[in-house]
């Protein structure tokens, strides 16, 4: 389970700083063969031309707003690396600059001859003893695409309901109740870090993403010979469809109306893992943060590498040690919810979760079957610091994902698909309660799980129920509103055009009447209900609930 990619916001964020650098380096050097990749750490940001008091120079408006809403200050960590340091290194003969890392204050480069490292170490702004070797020569062409293996025969399509064949994975986590309330992720930005999105533009069920400008940015941090975003792997495509598919009656993702950033950080063309992929992920996460993402989904995990000296040990998985885990915790501190698959090594000798699922702030998601039982491959916990991992579970066996015709759906298995189910569901809940902080969102998800407050090393806290979370938040909202008012029922907005929302402390059967007393609509309400009134002609109406009568106006468009 791995894969990843990268994105850009529709504003010119701080990456404009690097356009010139990237262009100069890429145009002349991409045709050459670079054999070794390193992370070069810098000593400071003392002379950067950027200032934390002017964040709009390097963060999007959306990213700044997210920080403001969650009381998260912009710090030196957010400042871009010093461009003078970058120029000094990239001007050395035989060096190809790949990307900067502002959270780690350094840069990832590739070199033909390691002798140039001697010159790099001589720079007084380089922490020479902390240079990290991340990979040997790599095939970055993306031509050897990894595909997602189909598990079983695709089921026959049923028009029984809007979720179609995805009904089981939707209902298992209680997201169907939010969909029925029209909370489908609209306005929430999800960054997807994966291996690539081959065939994504050919799948009917996610065509709305491209037709309606729902893809807010895309970036490939792996390829150095041109973007392989849509030509490198189908893994990210399958992950994306579990969230974004929208073909009512056949398949529906958990967040079909969310906005997405497509970010490639994993090299699916290589059979083995390399440490550089963790650094690619860091670059992707920084990019998503700058673009203003609310949620990051990562269906990737790292434990062992082609270079065995770089392997992670179980002791390394303590929640804050590996490069990708450190960055995941930083990403969370910026106000994003970080959702990560637990890994598929549960039935192998390793058996544990993988990085960054061990992260202390990461919401790690394991896999269950349609009966709610853990599937054997799902990675187990705890992390080596004793923290419960995985955190929660979702369907990981025979998950329905969208595919190209003639088969509109296919079944895929792995915790790679458990994670996006939860990430998409979180987007729907965030749409309903935008004021929730990232910490509150993570806490509510965990506390709604069916085993909570109990837990286990195999199931974490269990399977969350987003309908339960919504109802709990709704009741708290109603109680808060009604304790401040004399009325038992509140109706808003008034006047209204599309819908009215009713909050009540008693509940029961309601009727909407026109001014002559003729019923035009009816139903039941518990504590809160949003009622569509678009079909009503403009005019005055009466909302009746028990003995209460509230007059409201349906406006003209």
Image (cartoon, grey):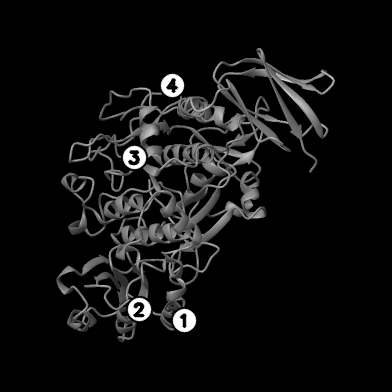
Q: From the viewer's perspective, is residue 236 above or below residue 526?
A: below
In front: label 4 or label 2: 2
Image quadrant assignment for residue 452:
top left
For disc 2, the neighbor class at 10 Å (few under 14, some 14 to 19, many from 20) is: some
Residue at 30% across, 30% down = 460
Q: CA distance from mark 1 to mark 3?
A: 39 Å
Disc ID at residue 83: 2
CB under 8 Å between discs 4 and 2: no
Image coordinates for residue 85, horizontal then vertical, percent: 30, 79
Q: Is residue 59 left or right of residue 524?
A: left
Instruction: Find disc 1 in the rendering and name its residue.
Output: 27
Image coordinates for residue 163, horizontal then vertical, percent: 61, 31
Nearest the viewer among 28 and 156 is 28
CB under 8 Å between discs 1 and 3: no
For disc 1, the neighbor class at 10 Å (few under 14, some 14 to 19, many from 20) is: few
Q: From the viewer's perspective, is residue 22 above or below residue 531?
A: below
Q: Secondary structure at mark 4?
A: loop
Q: CA distance from mark 4 to mark 2?
A: 54 Å
Image quadrant assignment for residue 495:
top right
Instruction: Find disc 3 in the rendering and name its residue.
Output: 344
For disc 3, the neighbor class at 10 Å (few under 14, some 14 to 19, many from 20) is: many
Of the numbered discs 1 and 2, the one sitting upstream in the chain is 1
Q: Is residue 168 left or right of residue 281?
A: right
Image coordinates for residue 22, horizontal then vertical, percent: 43, 77
Q: Is residue 365 left or right of residue 479?
A: left
Determine if residue 319 is in view. yes
Residue at 51% across, 45% down = 238
Disc ID at residue 279: none
């Amino acid at each position: 389970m791995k894969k990843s990619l990268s994105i850009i916001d529709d504003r010119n964020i701080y990456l404009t700083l690097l356009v010139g650098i990237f262009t100069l380096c890429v145009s002349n050097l991409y045709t050459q063969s670079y054999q070794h990749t390193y992370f070069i750490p810098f000593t400071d940001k003392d002379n950067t031309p950027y200032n934390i008091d002017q964040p709009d120079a390097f963060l999007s408006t959306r990213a700044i707003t997210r920080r403001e809403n969650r009381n998260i200050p912009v710090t030196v960590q957010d400042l871009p690396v010093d461009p003078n340091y970058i120029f000094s290194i990239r001007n050395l003969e035989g060096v190809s600059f790949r990307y900067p890392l502002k959270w780690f204050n350094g840069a990832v480069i590739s070199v033909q001859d390691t002798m140039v490292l001697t010159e790099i170490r001589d720079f007084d702004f380089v922490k020479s003893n902390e240079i990290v070797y991340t990979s040997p020569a790599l095939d970055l062409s993306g031509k050897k695409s990894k595909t997602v293996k189909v598990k079983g025969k695709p089921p026959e399509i049923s028009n029984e309901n809007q979720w179609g064949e995805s009904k089981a994975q939707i209902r298992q986590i209680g997201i169907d109740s939010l969909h029925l309330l029209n909370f489908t992720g609209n306005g929430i930005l999800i960054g997807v870090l994966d291996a690539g999105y081959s065939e994504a533009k050919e799948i009917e069920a996610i065509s709305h993403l491209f037709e309606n400008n729902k893809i807010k940015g895309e970036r490939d941090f792996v390829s150095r010979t041109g973007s392989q975003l849509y030509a490198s792997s189908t893994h990210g495509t399958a992950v994306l469809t579990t969230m974004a598919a929208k073909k009512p009656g056949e398949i529906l993702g958990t967040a079909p109306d969310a906005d997405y950033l497509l970010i490639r950080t994993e090299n699916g063309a290589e059979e083995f893992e390399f440490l550089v992929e963790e650094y690619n992920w860091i670059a992707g996460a920084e990019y998503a943060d700058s673009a203003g993402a609310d949620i990051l989904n990562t269906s990737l995990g790292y434990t062992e590498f082609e270079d065995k000296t770089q392997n992670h040990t179980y002791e390394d998985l303590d929640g804050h040690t590996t490069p990708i885990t450190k960055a995941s915790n930083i990403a969370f501190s910026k106000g994003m919810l970080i959702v990560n698959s637990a890994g598929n090594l549960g039935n192998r000798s390793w058996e544990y979760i993988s990085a960054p699922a061990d992260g202390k702030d990461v919401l790690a998601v394991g896999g269950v079957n349609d009966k709610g039982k853990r599937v054997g491959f799902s990675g187990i916990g705890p992390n080596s610091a004793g923290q419960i991992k995985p955190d929660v579970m979702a369907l990981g066996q025979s998950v329905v994902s969208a595919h190209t015709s003639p088969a509109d759906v296919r079944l895929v298995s792995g915790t790679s698909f458990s994670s996006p189910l939860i990430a998409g569901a979180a987007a729907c809940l965030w749409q309903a309660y935008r004021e929730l902080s990232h910490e509150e969102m993570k806490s509510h998800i965990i506390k709604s799980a069916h085993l909570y407050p109990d837990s286990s090393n195999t199931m974490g806290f269990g399977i969350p129920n987003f309908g339960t979370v919504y109802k709990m938040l709704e009741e708290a909202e109603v109680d808060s509103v009604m304790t401040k008012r004399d009325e038992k029922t509140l109706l808003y907005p008034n006047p209204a055009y599309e819908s009215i929302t009713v909050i009540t402390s008693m509940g029961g059967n309601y009727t909407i009447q026109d001014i002559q007393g003729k019923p035009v609509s009816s139903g039941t309400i518990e504590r809160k209900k949003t009622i569509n009134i678009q079909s009503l002609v403009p005019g005055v109406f009466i909302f009746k609930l028990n003995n209460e009568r509230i007059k409201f106006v349906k406006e003209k468009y």
